[in-house]
């Protein structure tokens, strides 16, 4: 065990090899041909294959006093004659606990190494197949986990025979056990494959997978914050929260800010959800809508690397976060991942798509941030989706957590497209055509209100101005004129509709701001697209002292 290394024989190597059907390991007739470093002894321990491999390896580990152990899968033969010398060279670094010949820097959200991106290393198989992964940078490269074909160790860390009772996930788990103790796992550089591995189909059982993910998710996956603002619709909110709790992705931080004037939601949280440590619930009955939104914007878990908003009347599909995180793992250049979202009515029934939710691609597609951002501004269309839809890389948000494009939108901030524009200026986007969230369309949607439409129209003008001033997305005069002219058409249509509304308050300050913006945007077409308007975006808030 760790801390007892001095009791081990540091001049001894144990080869622990799983046997084939005849009860003999494949390595036995070849072991004498492998070079043994001077002063070292090698012993062979043959163990049965199949069943609880972790338990089998644990028993073999306890049987030997060798400091160095090499665990081989059935049918495996060492091809590199100086393998032991190479292994010892790697283990000269005392912080390296395990070495494999194939590994990954990030295990997929399924827990399966084989489904992971950027797999390193090389293998040959007895059925003439071969595997060559990503190139190794340097003599070795650190990985999160190695495959079970070969696992070499220099410390005896207990195998988790208590968790797994089949021949899957034991290798991944062992590497994480080393990580928990501060040791690294690595894959060495191989010009040619060092191991001939027996043909092995990838197999796993659902029970072991669930146990693995339950045990190790917080060790191997980035923390994702789910932020839910809610107000006096506990039924919808409960469904939304339950859709988060049913996510296959485990490492979640769930923040809820509730400005309900009654206690119905608060009582439900205490009664039904208080025992989940992932949930952080706050009740602010004195808050208005702006204060609740601001509290949600200000929430920043320093340990979270990703964030997804969830409107309290929308829903996540169970694999939404897992699917999107795997996409981030495979594409380091992304700033956000989004998907088609299914429209549902107040009762949860599927609705036909509306123009804003129609699919933008028929297959999984990667878009450049520049292209999507420019199209958003030119066509004045939120191609990414509502806040519920997208998973974001948090470091690209304002101040590392806040929403918006410029930070100047103030009371005219719309929660989604300005944030998408900021992120798309710093990375690319992947779109999934399958529905990973559900967008509820009903009379209570805030975006249907007249005030929200005024604010949204002003916000569109502000982000167009910001893009032109910073020379982002809208780089030439023609494209800038298209964006400005498109906005003027949209605003004109809104003003036409507004004039037909009985008792419309023409003196409303926000409406007056819209008229000011309209004048500035109109003048910009005569001023080489230089947009100039001055409106007060100050937000007056009445928040708790510790949340301002």
Image (cartoon, rainbow, N blue to C red):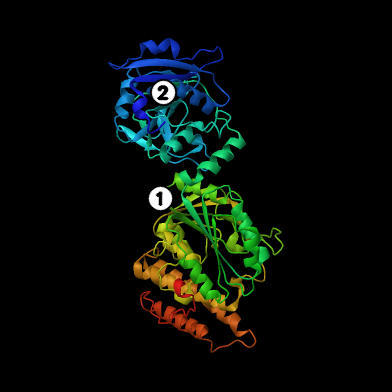
Q: 226 or 548, which is in the foreground?
A: 548
Q: 264 or 221, which is in the foreground?
A: 264
Q: 483 or 317, which is in the foreground?
A: 317
Which is more foreground, mark 2 or mark 1? 2
Image quadrant where residue 481 sits? bottom left
Give the total number of marks visible in the rendering: 2
Label number found at residue 333: 1
Image quadrant where residue 258 sits? bottom right
Q: Which residue is mark 2?
A: 70
- For numbered disc 1, what is the local secondary structure? loop
* Residue 215 percent across, percent down from the top left: 53, 42
In which quadrant is the C terminus drawn?
bottom left
Decide: few, some or many residues near mark 2? Use Cα within 10 Å; few <14, some 14-19, many ≥20. many
Inspect this view and state whether residue 445 appears: yes
- For numbered disc 2, what is the local secondary structure? strand
Decide: few, some or many residues near mark 1? Use Cα within 10 Å; few <14, some 14-19, many ≥20. some
* Residue 358 percent across, percent down from the top left: 60, 58
Q: Up-down: is 327 above or below 162?
A: below
Q: Up-down: is 114 above or below 474?
A: above
In which quadrant is the N terminus drawn?
top left
Comes first in the chain, label 2 or label 1? 2
* Residue 348 percent across, percent down from the top left: 70, 60
Q: Residue furthest left?
A: 38
Q: 43 or 412, which is in the foreground?
A: 43
Task: Indicate left or right for 377 with 81 as reference.
Answer: right
Identify the residue at image location x=35%, y=14%: 34
Q: Up-down: is 451 above or below 154?
A: below
User: Are the two marked residues, 2 and 1, in contact with CB atoms closer than 8 angstroms?
Assistant: no
Identify the residue at image location x=48%, y=39%: 116
C-alpha separation, residue under disc 2 versus residue under disc 1: 37 Å
Identify the residue at image location x=31%, y=21%: 85
Inspect this view and state whether residue 374 appears: no
């Amino acid at each position: 065990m760790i801390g007892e290394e001095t009791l081990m024989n540091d001049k001894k190597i144990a080869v622990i090899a799983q046997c084939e059907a005849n009860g003999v390991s494949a390595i036995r007739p070849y072991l004498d041909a492998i070079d043994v470093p001077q002063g070292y002894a090698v012993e062979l321990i043959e163990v049965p294959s199949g069943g609880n491999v972790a338990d089998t390896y644990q028993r073999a580990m306890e049987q030997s006093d060798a400091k160095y152990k090499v665990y081989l899968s059935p049918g495996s033969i060492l091809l590199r004659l100086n393998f032991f010398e190479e292994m010892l060279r790697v283990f000269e670094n005392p912080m390296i606990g395990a070495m494999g010949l194939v590994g990954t820097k990030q295990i997929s959200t399924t827990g399966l190494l084989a489904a992971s991106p950027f797999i390193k290393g090389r293998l040959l198989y007895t059925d003439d197949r071969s595997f060559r992964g990503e190139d190794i940078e340097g003599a070795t490269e650190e990985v999160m986990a190695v495959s079970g074909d070969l696992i070499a160790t220099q410390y005896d860390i207990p195998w988790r025979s208590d968790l797994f009772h089949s021949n899957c996930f034991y290798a991944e788990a062992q590497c994480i056990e080393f990580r928990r103790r501060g040791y690294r796992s690595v894959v060495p550089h191989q010009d040619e494959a060092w191991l001939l591995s027996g043909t092995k189909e990838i197999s796993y059982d659902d029970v072991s997978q669930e146990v693995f993910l339950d045990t190790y998710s917080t060790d191997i996956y980035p923390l994702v914050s789910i932020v839910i603002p809610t107000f006096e619709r506990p039924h919808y909110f409960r469904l939304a929260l339950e859709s988060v709790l049913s996510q296959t992705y485990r490492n979640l931080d769930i923040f809820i800010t509730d400005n309900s004037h009654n206690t119905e939601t608060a009582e439900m949280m205490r009664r039904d959800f208080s025992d989940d440590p992932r949930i952080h619930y706050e009740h602010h009955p004195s808050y208005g809508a702006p204060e609740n939104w601001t509290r949600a914007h200000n929430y920043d878990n320093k340990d979270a690397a990703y964030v997804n908003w969830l409107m309290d009347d929308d829903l996540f599909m169970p694999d939404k976060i897992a699917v999107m995180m795997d996409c981030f793992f495979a594409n380091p250049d992304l700033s956000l991942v989004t998907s088609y979202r299914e429209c549902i009515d107040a009762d949860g029934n599927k609705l036909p798509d509306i123009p804003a939710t129609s699919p933008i691609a028929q297959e999984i597609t990667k878009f450049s941030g520049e292209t999507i951002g420019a199209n958003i501004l030119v066509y004045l269309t939120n191609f990414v989706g509502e806040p519920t839809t997208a998973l974001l890389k948090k470091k690209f948000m304002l101040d590392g957590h806040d929403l918006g494009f410029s930070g100047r939108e103030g009371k005219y901030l719309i929660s989604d497209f300005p944030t998408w524009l900021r992120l798309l200026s710093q990375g690319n986007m992947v779109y999934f055509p399958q529905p990973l969230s559900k967008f509820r369309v009903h009379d209570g949607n805030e975006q249907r209100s007249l005030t929200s439409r005024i604010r949204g129209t002003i916000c569109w003008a502000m982000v167009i101005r910001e893009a032109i001033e910073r020379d982002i997305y809208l780089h030439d005069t023609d494209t800038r004129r298209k964006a400005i002219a498109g906005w003027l058409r949209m605003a004109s249509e809104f003003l036409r509709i507004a004039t037909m509304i009985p008792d419309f308050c023409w003196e409303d300050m926000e409406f007056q701001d819209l008229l000011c913006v309209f004048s500035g945007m109109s003048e910009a077409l005569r001023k080489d697209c230089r947009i100039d308007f001055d409106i007060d975006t100050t937000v007056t808030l009445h928040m708790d002292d510790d949340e301002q």
